[in-house]
Amino acid sequence: MRIFLSVPFTQFVNEKGKVDSAYRSDIESVINILEESGHKVYCAPKKEGWKITDHDPVTAFKRVFKEIDACDLFIAILKFDVSAGVELGMGYAFAKKKRIIIASPTGHNLGWNNHALINQENVMNMNYSFFDELAKQITNTISR
Amino acid sequence: MRIFLSVPFTQFVNEKGKVDSAYRSDIESVINILEESGHKVYCAPKKEGWKITDHDPVTAFKRVFKEIDACDLFIAILKFDVSAGVELGMGYAFAKKKRIIIASPTGHNLGWNNHALINQENVMNMNYSFFDELAKQITNTISR
C-alpha cells in the first residue's frame, strides 16, 4: 500500500533547520515498521533529508500534494500543538476521499474539528503512547 | 459571488461555548461589508448563532464542507495562533481548486506551509490591521 505519512515538521527543527534527533528516531521507527510490512511510505521530512529546505518551498509544496494524490492511505500523526501542515494535508486528503488514519497522543484533546473529522467516513482515530506500538497497530489494521 | 469565510472559532469561545463579543464584532463587520457589496457569505460561527454546537459535530462538519464545495471564493482569516479548522478548510478548498484569499495579521509569520500555499495558483495573501479595511480590500480585489 502506498502511504503518505504526515507529521509535524517545522515545529521540530532547530535554528539551522535540522529536525530534532529524538523526534527523527520516533518517526523513522514508524517508517521502518511500515516499510518492513511491505508498504511504500512517503514522509516529507525524510524526503527532504530531515531538514527544512527553503530554496523552493512553492515547488516542494506542490510535490507534497501530488504525493497525497497518489497515496492509498493518509496517516496523520498529531502532537499536542496544532500543526498547520498536517491540518492542511488532512483537509486536502479528505477532499480527495482518501482513507485517513489520525493518530493522536494518549490524553490529547482533539478539538472540535479533528473530533468531527475522525467520525467521518473513511477516517479513523488511533491513540498512541509509543511510536513503535502505533506503527504495529497501523500495520495490523490495514492488513485486515 | 458566493463566499466561504473561514475564521478561527473554538479559540474564541468562552467556557459556555459563546463567541467573544469583540471578536464577533470584528467578523460581523467583514461579513456586513461583503454582503453590502452583493456577495453571499457563509461563516460557520454566524450560522451556528455565535456559539459552539456540540450536539452533532459530525453533521455540522459535513455541512461546512458542502458549503466549501459550493463557494466561488474561500477566504481564510488567520490569527496569530494556528487554527486547526481554518487549515483543514484551506487544504480542502485547495484540493477543490477554489480561488483562495488568505488574510493574515500584519507582522504575522505565516510559517513554511502557509507561505508556500499563498504562492500557489489561485491563492493570494492579504495583510490586515483592521477588519473593516480588510473587507474593503477584498471587495475591491474581487470586483476587478
Image (cartoon, coloured by chain):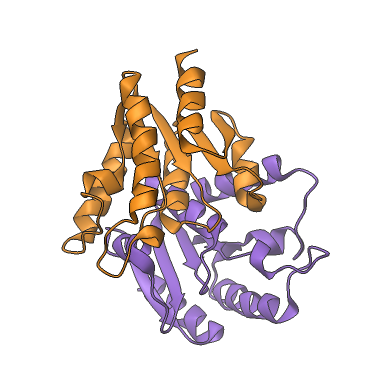
Chain colours: A orange, B purple
On screen, residue A2 versus residue B93, left or right, reads: left
On screen, residue A107 versus residue A135, left or right, reads: right
Residue B116: x %, y % from top left: 29, 61
Q: Residue furthest right?
A: B16
Answer above or below: position of B74 versus B105: above
Q: Residue at x 44, y 75 (%)?
A: B104
Residue A117: x %, y % from top left: 59, 41
The N terminus of chain A - image quarter: top left
Answer above or below: position of A94 versus B112: above
Residue B49: x %, y % from top left: 77, 62
Residue A45: x %, y % from top left: 29, 48
State the residue in front, B136 or B26: B26
Q: Residue at x 45, y 32 (%)?
A: A132
Number of callouts in the render?
A: 0
Q: Is residue B16 visible?
A: yes
State the residue in front, B75 or A27: A27
Q: Residue at x 62, y 75 (%)?
A: B27
On screen, residue A51 versus residue B45, left or right, reads: left
Quarter-of-image position of residue B111: bottom left
Q: Residue at x 30, y 70 (%)?
A: A15
Quarter-of-image position of residue B119: bottom left
